[in-house]
Image (cartoon, rainbow, N blue to C red):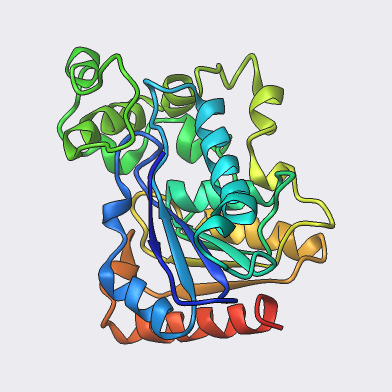
Amino acid sequence: MSADIYYQGAGTPVIIYIHSGALIFGTREWLPNEQIEYFNNNGFSVVNIDYRLAPETNFELIIEDIRDAIHWVRTGAIQWYDFDINKIAVMGGSAGGYLSLLTGTMDYKPNVIISFYGYGDILGSWYTQPSEYYCKKPIVDREHALNKIGNSEITNGKWDRFDYYVYCRQQGRWIQEVLKIDPKSDANKIKHYNPVDNITEGYPPTLLLHGTQDTDVPYEQSVIMYEKLKDMGINCKLITIDGADHVFDHNFKDQQVQVAFSELLEFLEVHLLK
């Protein structure tokens, strides 16, 4: 596992960023420089991580990578960086948002969670059934999909692996392919990795940001997580981006996005910097 460290000085709060890609593709290089500069300019150090990808790596080992990253920032990074290890936020988009939400169920919890168009319910029909949106695209057969993946562990998933993801979505087989678990016969095992089913009183303050026209992860995924957090008495907020699709935050200069990042900063100031 590798990381880029954008250090802003002694005692600075830390944002650990987890990239998107359905746990199948993607790289830490996807975090836009505009966002890194925005957080740096507002006094945050950023730790931008890679992690091992599925299906070559067992899902539980991917979770272990995320746990190890938080643990390293808390205990190992002090050799080189004197972050404020009592002020750690975990942030991610899409699958990175899912992994961020999952950190709230771990032993090493962050102080704050920020989820951009993430998902709290991997057992929902949106992921376990064929996707209407992806089924409108050219059908990817299994042989072609499997040709896009390999046999050895990787942490940098190239875009051609997206075809394997499309196959998973068209067949409603993401859980079987990535988690290697049957959602029908082993739903209880999957619930262990389902953030919405594992919210406790100690869950960190959480900010969810989602576009209403998201074609990849339904907007309702953040609504469901928000309602459950609210019911459990967790400090939480849902920022709705009207008309926005997936990865809306990469359109950084858009007025709605600028307002959303201002609200994100306010959330961090209240729940992380207090």
Of all residues, the one furthest to the front in this rendering is: 79
- 142 vs 7, left or right, is left
Q: Is residue 243 visible?
A: no
Q: Quadrant of the C terminus?
A: bottom right
> Which sits in the foreground, 51 or 115?
51
- 83 vs 235, left or right, is left
Q: Is residue 207 visible?
A: yes
Task: Tally the marks.
Answer: 0
Q: Is residue 147 above or below residue 1?
A: above
Q: Is residue 266 above or below residue 1?
A: below
Residue 162 locus on image (x, y percent): 23, 36
* Residue drawn 25% across the image and 15% down it: 142
Instruction: Give the quadrant of residue 10.
Output: bottom right
Residue 260 locus on image (x, y percent): 45, 80
* Residue drawn 47% across the image and 36% down it: 127
- 76 vs 29, left or right, is right
> Which sits in the foreground, 3 or 135?
3
Q: Is residue 99 above or below residue 129?
A: below
Residue 77 locus on image (x, y percent): 54, 55
Q: Quadrant of the N terminus?
A: top left
Residue 28 locus on image (x, y percent): 33, 51
* Residue drawn 26% across the image and 36% down it: 157
> Which sits in the foreground, 241 or 261?
261
